[in-house]
Amino acid sequence: MSDSQSEQFTECPNLRGWICQRQATQMTDLERLDFYWFSGTGNTLLVAQALADLFADEGWDVRLQPMTDTDPTSVQPEGWVGLAFPVACQTTYPLVWRFCERLAPGQGTPIFMVDTMAGYSGAVVGPLRGVVLKRGYTPIGAREIIMPSNLYPIRVSEERNQRLRERGQEQARAYARDLLAGRAHWGHIHILPDLFRAIMGSRPMWHWIARTDGLLRVDQERCTRCGLCAALCPVANIRLAPWPEYQRRCEQCMRCLSYCPEKALGLWGLPRVPYRAVPADALLPSPRKAGEPCPGDGEQKVA
């Protein structure tokens, strides 16, 4: 692909424009979707699965892959790329930003995003659009979907949560139809979202968040040292020595607190009802050695 063609791809405003470009260059591999996801306690995975299922029903070859099992530098786009992740601190987790910022060059590949949140974001859609453009992708759609909160809930209405999950999955399917029909859009309001991301996604902010794991407590009378918390942690922040110990790189995904089968983990002095949208098995990554970071993630320990 020439530099001029790459520039034309980047400037395509939507899916219809991209299809015209592909037809003009006689490139017809439109039916492959590489869909990368990260999910704290399952909301995003439910949305990603609903969206992926609709693409598959339309005859697409869908590869639904966890970000935590994928080296982004090795991604080789052959059709479209999708990104799914939760909102955290009105932006998203550093591990998600690292993944997106290290994606292999896209050469005009169409890319879309979907995030899940309990309220609002403000520092995701626009800033991420800038990131994928710099990596050489063509942004074709962005959607934010309300799902139940997993952040230290004190009371949980399972009936309300089920309604939110069902509505969120239906919104995901509607979004998939919009993407396939060329009706989706990925806009960007300049300045404010970028400034907000610079603040909420800053190293000092997440340095402070990482240190909150010092408030987490292990009830040794309850803990059976099963190791599930360490296996689920996406940033290898927990080791058994012999009880769970936190390594000051926590990103507050809530997995360890939500999935401990004995409810042995908790935040000191704060009552909490675990929230789980999917079984733990659905979130378990490929086996890694204790303390080993995600593929392509590098060392993330915060001193």
Image: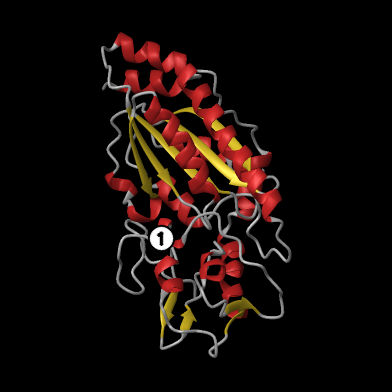
Q: Quadrant of residue 211?
A: bottom right
Residue positioned most to the front: 159
Residue 226: x and y in percent read 41, 79
Which residue occupies 34% across, 47% down? 72
User: In the image, 99: left or right of 47?
Assistant: left
- The one nearer the camera, 246 or 48, is 48
Residue 48 showing in the rendered view: yes
Which residue occupies 26% across, 12% down? 26
Pointer 1 residue: 281
Vertical order, 41 against 193 (above or below): below
Which residue occupies 49% across, 19% down? 14
Q: Amino acid at mark 1?
A: Asp
Vertical order, 246 against 79 (above or below): below
- The one nearer the camera, 215 or 137, is 215
Residue 12 showing in the rendered view: no
Residue 250: x and y in percent read 52, 68
